Image (spheres, rainbow, N blue to C red):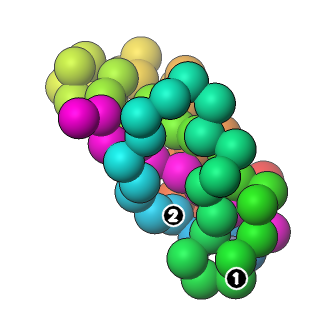
Amino acid sequence: MPIYEFTCLNCHNLFEELVFGEKPSYIRCPKCQSEQVQRCLSQVFSKVGSGETAKSSTTSCGSSGFS
Ligand SMILES: [Zn+2]
């Protein structure tokens, strides 16, 4: 089962959820219960591995790079 990373747009909390459908509209931030979450493709991270291109393409999902 796919586990995706989500970033909360409200409190910038990073969390993981199991996702069964393509539209995880039911996902809520476990910290502030906000529905304003953005899905991050963490699987891309592990796939690329070395990280150079992955880092530049996923900055919006980074734990600290959410400017
Ligand atoms: Zn939150």
Tell whether position 9 is magenta: yes
Residue 42 pos. (x, y %): 37, 36
- Mark 1: is the Cβ under 8 angstroms from ligand 1? yes
The span from disc 2 to disc 1 (Cα, nearest Å) is 12 Å
Quadrant (top left/top right/bottom left/bottom right) for the C terminus: bottom right
SS assignment at label 2: strand
- On the question of residue 55 being in view, the answer is no
Q: Residue at x 23, y 35 (%)?
A: 1
Q: Which residues make up the magenta segment?
A: 1-10
Pointer 1 local density, CA inside 10 Å: few below 14, some 14–19, many at least 20:
few
Marks 2/1 in contact by CB < 8 Å: the verdict is no
Which residue does the image show at 54% across and 51% down from the upper left? 6
Q: Is residue 63 above or below residue 32?
A: above
Dot 2 or dot 1, earlier in sequence: 2
Say which residue appears at 63% left-offset and 30% top-offset: 23
Query: Viewer-proximal residue, 3 or 44?
Result: 3
Residue named by callout 2: 14
Residue 60 in view of the camera: yes
Query: Is 9 rendered above or below residue 20?
Result: below
Find residue 32 and name its label.
1
Task: Inspect the image, locate mark 1, and give the three-letter code of the amino acid beneath it.
Answer: Cys
